[in-house]
Image (spheres, helix red, strand yellow):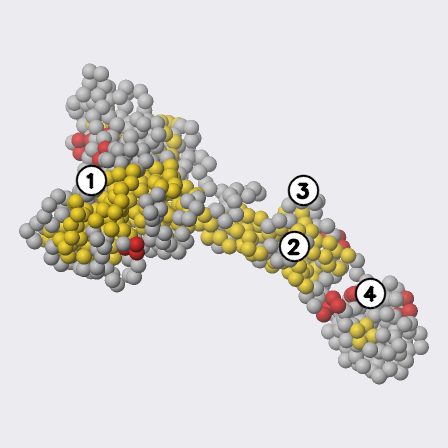
Amino acid sequence: MTSTPGTAPGGQSRLRRRAGTAAVAALLLAGIPVGAAVSADAGTPKTATGPQGQKLTVSATTGLDPAGQKVRVQGEGYGLTTGIYVALCKDNGDNRVPSPCLGGADMSGGSKTSQWIVPPGDPYEGDLAQAFGPGGTFDVEIEIAQKGDGLDCAEVACSVVTRADHRAAGDRTQDVRIPVAFAGQDPGDGGGEGVDVPAGTISYKSAAEFTTAGKPLDLLLHPDSKKLYVGADNLPDTADVDERGLHVLNPETGTSDSWISQAPGSTGALRASAAARIAGPLPGDGVVYNYPLRGVGSAKSGDEAASGVWLAGPTITDIAPGTTPDTVLVAQGATLSEIERATGTATRTLTLPGGTQFAADPERGALWYTDFAAGKMHRVDLTSFTVSGSFDLPGGPGGMAGFTETDPATGAVWVGVDRSVLVFDAAGTLVKTLVGKDLARDAAFDTASGRAYVVRQDGGDLSDPANDNNGTLTVYGTEDFAVAAKDLSLPGNHSQAGAASLAVEPGGTTVFVTSPAEGKITKLVRQVSPLVTRAPADLTAKEGEEVALTAEAEGAPEPTVRWQVSTDGAQTWKDVEGATESALTFTARTAQDGYRYRAEFRNDVGTTRTAAVTLTVTAATGGDTGGDVGGDTGGNGDASNGVGSTGGDGATGGDGGTQTSGGSTNGGSDSTGGSGSTGTSGGSSGTVGGSGSTVGGGVAGGTGTAATSGGGSLAATGATVMSVTLAAAGLVGAGVLVHRRARRRTEGAL
């Protein structure tokens, strides 16, 4: 059960007393699973209908003042035998506790952050609670704010809710909720003009919440079947269903593939049993797990019940795969045993000075046994089954037990104690202490990426200023122990109803984290802000040439790109219209000389830009354009028909007519044509100015050989020369500059 101000550990409500009054306090907001149908109208006010026809109306539900404002809450049709609470709470979805909540029980009758409504004549009617009106009606005001008492509606979904009071905490018939939103909560477009996070920043975000497995205690993502196995206990104050057992979920959707609720008890008879801790996977599918108090079971998806054995001795406190496929290692307090799964017979037993949990490292034949009470850790040699070393846990005896896990890649031992994670190397030497703001509860390793994932839980006691009800997911590199991903807040994940656990998909793309207090599993997906992998570079082009800039970036989700241009030396920027591909291609113009360009990549995580590059454009010359532009004294050829019009006179150094789709271009006559240095691209043969004439001056009585596209004919010989510009496309840095003759007129990029 989720903690609220004054809630006792373990989710049990605690009575707070006003002087001289036996009054109930913060347990009023312990939990409100709801299943109400909300009206489709998105405006305000809004009305919701409860499971017994109750109607709840809130006067304002959108654009609320984050600093706080009063809202009117009205109800009708509520039962006259059960008291209810009215409050603003975190909305955890249908049939789940919406907690934490803003405020607590109104001890003075004046705070108005919550209201307590009771049947007429109820002992609490008066200063602390008001009575229902006729027909189960009420009309109250509460003051709600975006943030307070461990609740932050900017991070989580919030609703105004009603629920049965503490005297009927498991009664779900009074549950009704209406979602609300505060002003400025829209996420916007993700970064504006500024680069908001460093390129390549890794983070995680919630993609889904699974509430199909009761109160989740442990997780395993099966390496072969890819199914998500969840060890679960029953979640109180929800549905009238005992949810204990081993749940098998589809990791994509959270839907249930199977639920194994029964396992053999002390007499061998099947009984409903929670799945306390999962030891490891079975080949192909299925897991070995511990069920309370001393059961060792195995099951796979589709099984009607688990097979198992019941051990003698104390309660099992930890479990792991044995040294052979048919055995399992079991801790029963300070006693370590290796037992046969089929019979429960102990093949080896070792008693240590103390301890409760361990981590096995089969690759190195070692097992690490932690004794948090004494501040010690012992190494057990799995071959000889003897203690081969003992080590101190910094901080001394009495640290709050978190976890003991080994990194399969390095053999390092990670131990969670209080808010710290102690990292020992494979020899038992302390190499790093990682301190966080929350209690270290579980760790998992991804050998593919070399990262360790640690889930931390808040203490849940809001009387402690260090607590805020929100946990944290932290990610570290296993070689340098540096933070490898942005810390992720886990709202509502506190330790008062059990320790959180996690499972990591190979590669680290998906992480699953449990929240026992909320009865849910949160599916987290990896995000990476755009990281440029290919950037453009400065380039030079001639008037009329086509150029291309290329930029690429990687990220998750895949980033989009838009190109931007600055005409004032990078003082201001504007988007190039329609330029949303990795390559920006346009025809260079002299007016663009000195323009600067950059690519901007965006995804949900952030914005990254390439460095700005400069375009230099030089004026074209006759030889370079090869006839694309008319000479100084001649006009352009007509590109709309099959025969070019008269071009410039070769004697003036001009080019011939503009290139056309067919026919020759008229140049100077045989008798008057000058010795122009460059010709134009012509048709298949000359038709004007004599046989075989070439534009820009030809040789009288020539052979009629067609001029080569882009090449000029030497006046003396008629031989063809190919322009260097047309012969190659040059790579400039990581970006691309492409030169070629423009076949048609295109506009430049601004």
User: Compared with residue 443, is residue 15 higher up or lower down, i.e. above or below?
Assistant: above
Q: CA distance from mark 3 to mark 4?
A: 36 Å
Point out the frontmost of discs 1 and 4. Answer: 1
- Type of amino acid under label 2: Ala
Residue bearing mark 1: 354
Residue bearing mark 3: 571
- Type of amino acid under label 4: Gly
Q: Is residue 108 visible?
A: yes
Q: Nearer the viewer, residue 302 or 125?
A: 302
Under circle 3, the secondary element is loop
Res 537 label: 2
Q: Is residue 162 visible?
A: no
Q: Nearer the viewer, residue 696 or 645?
A: 696
Under circle 4, the secondary element is helix
Q: Residues within 10 Å of mark 2 (few under 14, many from 20)?
A: many
Q: Nearer the viewer, residue 715 or 337?
A: 337
The residue lying at 42 percent from left, 28 percent from top is 67
Task: Answer with the quarter of the image where residue 672 lies.
Answer: bottom right
Q: CA distance from mark 1 to mark 3?
A: 69 Å
Q: CA distance from mark 2 to mark 3?
A: 19 Å
- Type of amino acid under label 1: Gly
User: Compared with residue 473, is residue 693 higher up or lower down, i.e. above or below?
Assistant: below
For marks 3 and 4 on the same chain, the one whose residue lies earlier in the sequence: 3
Point out the frontmost of discs 1 and 3. Answer: 1
